[in-house]
């Protein structure tokens, strides 16, 4: 659907056009408007297929509005069909200038888009001619992109599209900054730049788990960012009760962050930004909903929205921005170079703005404070025990212990990851409307290394040592130094061995060795009658043998 005409918000010629397709039966384009009629808010809707032409002229699959450089606003309706009721085959376009509520202008003649063969029309969008920068309509099919350049439809040469031909080609499309973005099959989201497709989507360079994969189904541009709706864990194109959708925030080629997650089986298929200028005055009856812009979306059968910061405003300093009074924070299993190992979580520091520093919680002492509950190794636990100290009330930063260290026997908070519940409490009548926010949470922790058994056997290394069969060693191992060098090579390469021991407990263990420690034992000389004496060395050494696995 598209909205064209007039000057919002009070012009009665602002009309919303809703295409309804023509298969399996012809369905007309629908018109809708709301306007102020002499102080009375009036809502009207009607079909434009009523006594003004045949069904073939007033039905379509998609519509797009384009600001033509010469003709001004133009409406294009684009259809793919097999000639049923229209006589045209393949993708066909017609255009006209917007009419009024009472007088709809006639559509111009059919314009063929591509070959006159049955085709699959996916989406349309207004973008620019890459040579002239004039605004023109673009059309996406399963494996091609068309643009109406110099008065005729031309194919954009992108052979790579054929490798990903699907119903997802351009299903989600948006113009962000000066680039055109479109979806491809398999969760790809591409930037069209100088005739090339550059992958910028949520799956870029990531081996995502199956539950996080999915198709990009909607894209909406906003100053400084773009919002993507994604269907996760799709199987054979079906969306069942165990699937879910999410909205992601795209702010650069390597910055795509989760913004909202929908419920199970509640599909998000459509997004739209309602831009509310910051200078617009809203009556007091609506102030409680804020003066920010809204990201509207359909989730299941519900129409919902998320508040967005006003254009150019910082949400942390915008008094009309709706903040969440309570939120969950899950620490990653791998962060700050601490991997998936047991950790002792020592303290929590909160970076904040405008906490009042009052002596207590709530009236009559406190005005703004944060209560924190924490638990280790649990997601969505039934309760979050409060941390030591109970609350934070100082800005810009304050640190609290997560464990009571006053007792002799301390049971620390430990685990592989930490879950936090942060509750922001404000008494508006007391803090003068000062915006309060939490900017960051820092956790101090200690890493516990895994424990492995280690053994320290002694060994003797001598020049001209015999092997286990009583024969002289081969040349590479004929000296004490060569023997020790070989041990160091095994240690550097983390070579694994099977330990053979007289102890049945140790026998058969898989081990690695550390670099040996050695000291001289003795030096022997050859016969004094020879012209040349040969020194033979013997070394006593020890090395650490470290268990890799128990069995």
Image (cartoon, rainbow, N blue to C red):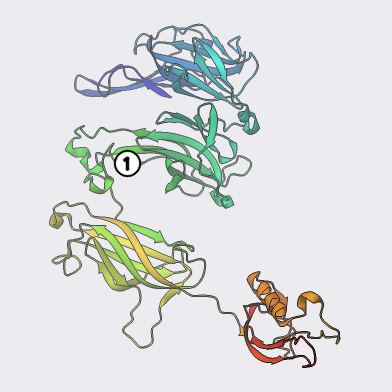
Between 448 and 427, the one lying in front of the other is 448
Q: Residue at x 20, y 67 (%)?
A: 361
In-front residue for pair 194/87? 194
Mark 1 surroundings: few (<14), some (14-19) or many (≥20) residues within 10 A:
many
Q: Is residue 344 left or right of residue 141?
A: left
Quadrant of the frame with the N terminus: top left
Q: Position of residue 225 (x, y in %)?
A: 38, 38
Where is residue 300 shown, x and y percent of the image?
47, 41
Residue at the spot 38% in from the left edge and 64% down from the top edge: 420
| Quadrant in the rendering for residue 427 | bottom left
Could you tell me which secondary element the residue under label 1 belongs to? Answer: strand
Where does label 1 land, which residue? Answer: 308
Please name the residue shown 77% across and 80% down the image.
478
The answer to whether 300 is drawn above or below residue 96 in the figure is below
Query: Along the line of sight, which residue is nearer the eye, 292 or 17?
Result: 292
Residue 294 in the image, given as x and y percentages of width and height: 33, 38
* Viewer-closest of 69 and 378: 69
Q: Is residue 333 at least partly visible in the picture?
A: yes
**Vertical order, 133 against 192 (above or below):** above
């Amino acid at each position: 659907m598209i909205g064209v005409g007039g000057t919002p918000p009070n012009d009665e010629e602002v009309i919303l056009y809703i295409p309804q397709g023509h298969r399996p039966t012809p369905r007309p384009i629908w018109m809708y408007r709301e306007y102020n009629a002499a102080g009375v808010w009036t809502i009207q809707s009607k079909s434009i297929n009523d006594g003004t032409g045949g069904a073939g002229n007033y039905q379509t699959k998609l519509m797009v509005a384009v600001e033509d450089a010469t003709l001004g606003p133009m409406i294009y309706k684009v259809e793919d069909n097999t000639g049923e009721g229209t006589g045209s085959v393949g993708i066909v376009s017609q255009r006209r200038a917007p009419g009024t509520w009472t007088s709809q202008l006639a559509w111009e003649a059919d314009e063929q888009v591509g070959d006159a063969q049955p085709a699959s029309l996916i989406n349309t969008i207004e973008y620019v001619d890459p040579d002239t920068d004039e605004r023109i309509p673009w059309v996406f099919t399963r494996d091609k992109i068309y643009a109406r350049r110099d008065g005729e439809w031309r194919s954009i040469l992108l052979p790579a599209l054929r490798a990903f031909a699907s119903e997802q080609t351009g299903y989600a499309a948006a113009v962000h900054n000066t680039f055109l973005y479109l979806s491809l099959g398999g969760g790809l989201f591409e930037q069209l730049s100088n005739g090339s497709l550059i992958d910028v989507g949520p799956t870029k360079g990531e081996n995502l788990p199956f539950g996080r994969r999915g198709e990009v189904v909607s894209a909406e541009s906003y100053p400084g960012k773009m919002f993507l709706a994604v269907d996760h864990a799709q199987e054979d194109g079906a969306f069942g009760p165990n699937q879910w959708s999410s909205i992601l925030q795209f702010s650069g080629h390597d910055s795509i962050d989760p913004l909202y997650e929908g419920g199970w089986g509640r599909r998000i298929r459509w997004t739209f930004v309602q831009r509310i200028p910051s200078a617009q005055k809203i009556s007091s009856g609506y102030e409680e909903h804020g003066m920010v812009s809204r990201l509207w979306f359909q989730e299941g059968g519900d129409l919902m929205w998320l508040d967005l910061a006003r254009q150019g405003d910082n949400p942390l300093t915008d008094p009309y921005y709706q903040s969440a009074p309570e939120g969950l924070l899950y620490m990653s299993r791998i962060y700050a170079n601490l991997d998936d190992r047991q950790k002792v979580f020592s303290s929590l520091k909160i970076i904040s703005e405008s906490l009042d520093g009052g002596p207590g919680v709530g009236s009559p002492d406190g005005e703004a404070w944060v209560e924190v509950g924490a638990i280790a190794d649990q997601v969505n636990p039934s309760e979050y025990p409060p941390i030591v100290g109970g609350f934070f009330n100082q800005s810009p930063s304050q640190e609290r212990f997560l464990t009571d260290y006053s007792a002799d026997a301390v049971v620390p908070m430990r685990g592989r990851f930490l879950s936090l519940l942060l509750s922001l409490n404000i008494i508006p009548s007391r803090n003068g409307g000062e915006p309060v926010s939490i900017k960051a949470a820092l956790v101090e922790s200690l890493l516990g290394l895994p424990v492995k058994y280690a053994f320290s056997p002694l060994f003797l290394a001598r020049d001209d040592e015999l092997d286990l069969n009583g024969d002289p060693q081969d040349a590479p191992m004929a000296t004490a130094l060569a023997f020790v060098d070989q041990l160091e090579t095994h240690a550097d390469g983390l070579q694994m061995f099977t330990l053979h021991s007289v102890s049945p407990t140790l026998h058969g263990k898989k081990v690695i060795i550390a670099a040996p420690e050695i000291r001289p034992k003795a030096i022997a000389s050859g016969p004094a009658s020879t012209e040349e004496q040969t020194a033979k060395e013997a070394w006593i050494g020890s090395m650490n043998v470290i268990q890799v696995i128990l069995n």
